[in-house]
Image (cartoon, rainbow, N blue to C red):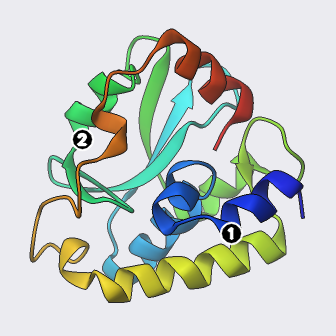
Amino acid sequence: MNERYQNLLRDSDEFLFLNGGCHVFALALEKQFHYPLVLIRENGKQNVPHVFCRSGEFAVDVMGFTIEQDILKAKKWLPHDQFSAEIIKPSELKKYYVYTCRPGLYADDLFMSEAGLRAEKRIADYIRFYDGTCKCQIRPHPFLKKTTNAEIDNILSTQN
């Protein structure tokens, strides 16, 4: 397993699932609640800065329910600009999988397994923030702070 992803597994759930494991968390949400998966992709490229689930006007990720447009605006992922937000089936997500540290979604079997167990536990521990009972965030979403140009460059170079 790539060292970057080994280190992610040693960090908090929030850091793991917002900095390289978002696809694993989104897949766990989709499996349990049947929410549609949404892939944020740089147009014409393999770059995937985030994957989450959608419930109405909300994006559902490790932080719980957040207004989707708020995240897209804050991270400058607005469709029709440089990025697109696409509903995607779990099987279609696999075409973005990578097994080395390059643009795409890291899919090493051990990483996917360990991150998947963490996702399932997080969902069980905070179920009301994911099942729609409490359509709010567990705490303020880190993505809602203004994205700097340096962060945009970092997002595109390290990828989720």
What secondary structure is found at the residue carrying circle 2? helix
Residue 43 percent coordinates (x, y): 57, 20
- Residue 107 against residue 158 in the figure, above or below: below
Quarter of the picture containing the C terminus is top right
Where does label 2 land, which residue? Answer: 68
**Is 133 left or right of 48, judged from the image as shown?**
left
- Residue 120 against residue 50 in the figure, above or below: below
**Is 15 left or right of 122, judged from the image as shown?**
right
Instruction: Tell me, for residue 32, which label it has, or none.
Output: none
- Residue 22 visible in the displayed image: yes
Quarter of the picture containing the N terminus is bottom right
The residue at the point 35 percent across, 42 percent down is 142
- Between 34 and 77, the one nearer to me in the picture: 77
What secondary structure is found at the residue carrying circle 1? helix
- Between 88 and 146, the one nearer to me in the picture: 146
Task: Bin the neighbour count of mark 2 within 10 Å (Cα to Cα): few under 14, some 14-19, many 20 and up.
Answer: some
The residue at the point 80 percent across, 64 percent down is 6
- Residue 107 visible in the displayed image: no
Residue 120 percent coordinates (x, y): 48, 84
The residue at the point 46 percent across, 87 percent down is 121
- Residue 113 against residue 139 in the figure, above or below: below
Where does label 1 land, which residue? Answer: 10
- Between 113 and 39, the one nearer to me in the picture: 113
Q: Are marks 2 and 1 in contact (CB under 8 Å)?
A: no
Residue 118 percent coordinates (x, y): 55, 80
Amino acid carrying mark 1 in the image: Arg
Q: CA distance from mark 2 to mark 1?
A: 28 Å
Task: Bin the neighbour count of mark 1 within 10 Å (Cα to Cα): few under 14, some 14-19, many 20 and up.
Answer: few
The residue at the point 28 percent across, 80 percent down is 126
Amino acid carrying mark 2 in the image: Glu
